[in-house]
Image: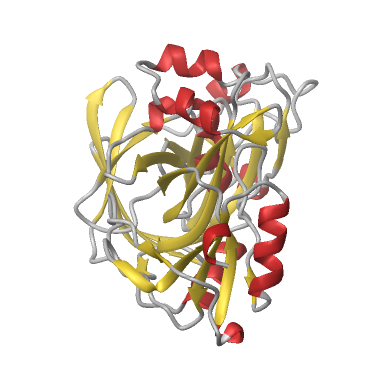
Amino acid sequence: MADLGEYRRKRDPACTPEPMPDSGLLPRGEDDVFVIQEHHARRLHWDVRFEREGVLVSWAVPKGLPPRPGTQRLAVHTEDHPLEYASFEGEIPAGEYGGGTMTIWDRGTYETLHWNDHKVEVRLRGSRVRGTYVFVNRHADRDWVVLRADKGTGEDLPEFVPPMLARKGSLPQDDSEWAYEFLWQGERAQARVEGGRAEFRNAEGEDVTWAYPELKGLGGQLGATEVLLDGELIALDGGKPGEEALRRRAEVSDSRQAKRLTDRFPVLYLPFDVLHLDGKSCLDDPYPRRRRRLERLRVEGDCWRVPKHYVGGGADVLTAALANGLAGITAKRLDSVYEPGRRSPSWRIVTRTRR
């Protein structure tokens, strides 16, 4: 039975901006409204709420609703919330229950296909989520699982794509047909973000997430975005990229050692390409389109940022790179697609020895 008693017990109206309706008869609607709130609390999760008998019946889904069938995700059944919560956005103060930032990620109407204490099946019609989902009670404390029951859309996010490689060469003659990026001489790394969690793999596809704990927050920044990024890891020594600093970070043997080195030799992740985005491969897109998609992600933080690229003007970019102590630049044809695992003539490394 719908009840706001637990909701009220967990909250002090003098300390939190969350809605706190007076006790009394619960309002009744059409039992057809849903809301999904992105909740940056101690751990990022998505609160999925359905209007039912005058309250919002709620589940906390750590990785968000699965976009395609074949994957089931944990869904923790939480206390009922008041209907007013369907429009709530704001900052719950630190130290309060659920402290953190709450924003509305999607909302709309839903159709009930099945509803009891063991199974809830609903068809959602929102601006971002449209489809049929099933919540199944595992009868283990409050833990349920949620899965998608219809076909969904898009392709699964790859675990890893063999990185495209560049050949050594000289500055192109047809300068306007090329883009230029600084050659950072870092460690190649792919970032896979799904369900607000980021994983990192090196050029051989080995999981190195544990070695770079300061990069954990990238997943939270990208939220529900599903993306596979290609880029470089550099380590800073006194605020400047250092080969010895990178070697020290790359050769750690356990996560505790990695954490001790984060202050002395912090790493910076520089994504320069996007390989897969929200259910769609980007490999066959030309370089400028991939760059636009990458820049729209707004990957910007203390430990990660998208490095600049320059169309044309290769000689000036090379001069600037050398003047700042870098080994050179990478030239990339504007019409080039991403060729996994291939050392392609469409990407060219230009160094001080081949000016």
Where does residue 236 sit, x and y in percent of width and height?
A: 62, 32
Q: Residue furthest right?
A: 14
Where does residue 333 sit, x and y in percent of width and height?
A: 48, 78
Residue 148 versus residue 121: which sits nearer the camera? 148
Where does residue 196 sit, x and y in percent of width and height?
A: 47, 42
Q: Is residue 320 left or right of residue 173?
A: right
Q: Is residue 153 left or right of residue 334?
A: left
Quarter of the image with the N terminus in it: top left
Q: Residue furthest left?
A: 70
Residue 314 versus residue 198: which sits nearer the camera? 314
Q: How is the image coloured?
A: secondary structure
User: In terms of image quadrants, where is residue 313?
Assistant: bottom right
Where does residue 117 sit, x and y in percent of width and height?
A: 27, 35
Camera sees residue 153:
no
Q: Relative to 319, say whether 103 is above or below.
A: above
Q: Residue at x 60, y 28 (%)?
A: 266
Q: Relative to 154, say whether 263 is above or below.
A: above
User: In terms of image quadrants, where is residue 250?
Assistant: top left
Quarter of the image with the C terminus in it: bottom right
Camera sees residue 350:
yes
Q: Residue at x 56, y 25 (%)?
A: 42
Q: Residue at x 36, y 15 (%)?
A: 254
Residue 244 versus residue 94: which sits nearer the camera? 244
